[in-house]
Image (tube, helix red, strand yellow):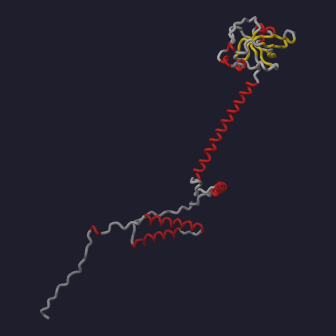
Amino acid sequence: MADDKVLPQLPERVRHLPEWETPVHPPKRSLFARLTDQVAVKRTALFTRNTLTPARSDESSIIQQDKETLDGGPILPTHTPTLDNNFSNPPPTSPTRRTLRDRFDALLPPNRTYWHLTRRSLLLFVALPLLLLFILALGLGLGLGLRNSHNSGTGYLPLPGDKAVHSGDLTYYDIALGACGWTNDDDEYVCAVAHSVYDAAATGSSKGNPNLNPLCGKKIRVMRDYSEAGLGNVTVDVTVVDRCVGCAPEDLDLSPAVFNRLAPETKGRVVGQWAWLD
């Protein structure tokens, strides 16, 4: 055995990791894991607040343990959510509003269809026609009201067929060429009727030619109590020769000669009565 050679004892081989294999950054946690931790913290906070037991230290220890045991090693430092002691549940909605909405949802559930329409489309198709119908009815009512008002106004015009005695203002003007096509003087017993009466009497061809108006040449009896001169009731017959633009339906615009028979010229405007003679 003397021939056996004793081999020298080699030192233990040490394996060094290359730099590129050395872990520089610890493994990162997933976003789902972080969200799960935050949800767990909030639930724990609500539970401890309802039971009135302080659990801030316990929650911190739980969070720390989860961080150390998860993934089996150290992890990157993450933000630890702080618990807000002022956190409170959202204010409850108004009972009245909630009740009305519940009743409406019970009457027309929002998740159902009505004649292949959603609830919003149904309300739109119902409300819009009702609004248009209301506008149409309002316009029709206003139109009929204005028409009736116009007809009632023309129906009470003092035309020759009306034998009633009318009361209105009496004025005078400078006589000249009138709407009937005649030229008269201030000394003649003539008058002008209101334009509304004159135009309402026009028929046929006289509508385009005021000289052919059937009121031209008509006789009117004018009456007034001439109290200023103590003459009592004075009556004067006049002939229609013109139309008065500024007169009301029952007013007459007289010649100066006729006005002086009924009132002092300085009055300018008096109240009198008149009626058609034919």
Which residue is farthest left? 3
Which residue is farthest bottom? 1
| For residue 191, above or below residue 155 | above
* Residue 196 drawn at (x, y percent): 71, 20
- Which residue occupies 72% across, 5% down? 185
* Residue 78 drawn at (x, y percent): 43, 64
| For residue 27, above or below residue 92 | below
- Which residue occupies 40% across, 73% down? 72
Q: So how many labels did they put on this image?
A: 0
Residue 236, quarter of picture: top right
In the image shown, does 121 or 271 lie closer to the viewer? 121
Classify the position of the C terminus by image quarter.
top right
Residue 206, quarter of picture: top right
Q: Is residue 152 at all visible to an observer of this figure?
A: yes
- Which residue occupies 59% across, 47% down? 125
* Residue 144 drawn at (x, y percent): 69, 33
* Residue 93 drawn at (x, y percent): 62, 56
Image-based side of 138 in relation to 118, left or right: right
| For residue 147, above or below residue 218 | below
Q: Is residue 94 at all visible to an observer of this figure?
A: no
Image-based side of 123 in relation to 28, left or right: right
Classify the position of the N terminus by image quarter.
bottom left
- Which residue occupies 71% across, 12% down? 242
